[in-house]
Amino acid sequence: RREPSLQLKGEGAGRNATMEDLNNFQDSTFVITAIVAAARHPGRFEVDVNGRSFASLSIEGLERLRISIGSDITDRLDAVLAEAACLAVYDRALNMLAFRARSGAELSRALVRKGADREHVSQAIHRLVEQGFIDDAAFARAFTRAKVVGASHSRRRVQQELQRKGVARDVAAEAIGEVLVEEGIDQLALIEAAARRKLRTLAGLEPAVRRRRLYGFLARRGFDAGDIQRVLSTLGDPVPPSDGE
């Protein structure tokens, strides 16, 4: 009769066993019986205990815990399971960063919402920062460039969005300033460019309605009321450009 496996369904190379899982077995000693490289997860190794799948570890984890085939880990079960759990959170964080860039705080909140242990999240974030996978300043610069150059958002709007993503105020302010200088962006010119693009969607409206909607559009992007008024004054009665323009 085949013994039930401790390897559970889950992310990555599989969800690791827990102490609760171990309580379902009557083993008095736990010995490493196999260590196999994970076929679909480079750098990860599937560890079998007493002939059953037990945990997924990195080569660094194997060395740190002095794990090899034949090792009796009965007195180190907690340490092995903690190592595996922390690695699983780290791998999940890497997968999330591969999907899109995030600030350290944003990634941390997302992992905790998904049920990850806070201590394991903290360790994973610290490791990712050390390795350069998380860089709030670089993230803020890229985010600013996309929002200011690509979507014509205001400095204030970008600052607010970065703060919601957990980027420190001073880091966000410095990144925004750098991007505005590098791109040679003038605030009034930015407002005017955004206004002219928006006007293309307001054709056919009465002038008063068109002006009101245009003002609301610019205000929602965080532009200063005085700057908006100055730009609208330079545009006069803002009439959408013709198709020939």
Image (spheres, grey):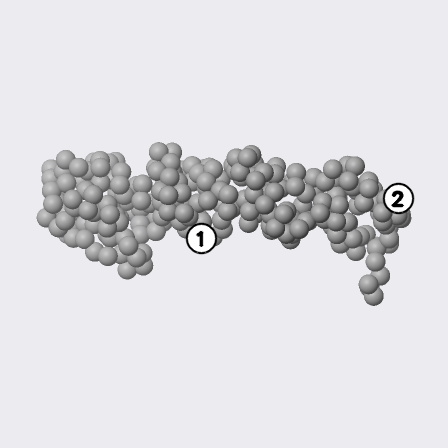
The amino acid type, in three-letter code, at marker 2 is Ala
Instruction: Please give the name of the residue rendered at 22% of the width and 40% of the height, measured from the top-left corner.
Output: 80
Compute the Cα span from label 2 to label 1. 47 Å
Q: Quadrant of residue 90?
A: top left
Above or below for 201 versus 221: below
Residue matched to label 1: 98
173 left or right, relative to 195: left
Residue 178 in the image: state x and y as whole percent.
Answer: 59, 45
Q: Is residue 19 above or below residue 92?
A: above
Pointer 2: what residue? Answer: 208
Q: What element does badge 2 sit on? A: helix
Q: Is residue 4 visible?
A: no
Q: How far across and down, in percent of the image, does residue 133 sit?
A: 42, 48
Which residue is more in the foreground, 158 or 212?
158
Badge 1 density bin: few <14, some 14–19, many ≥20, Cα 10 Å: few
Q: Left of 9 or right of it: where is 105?
A: right
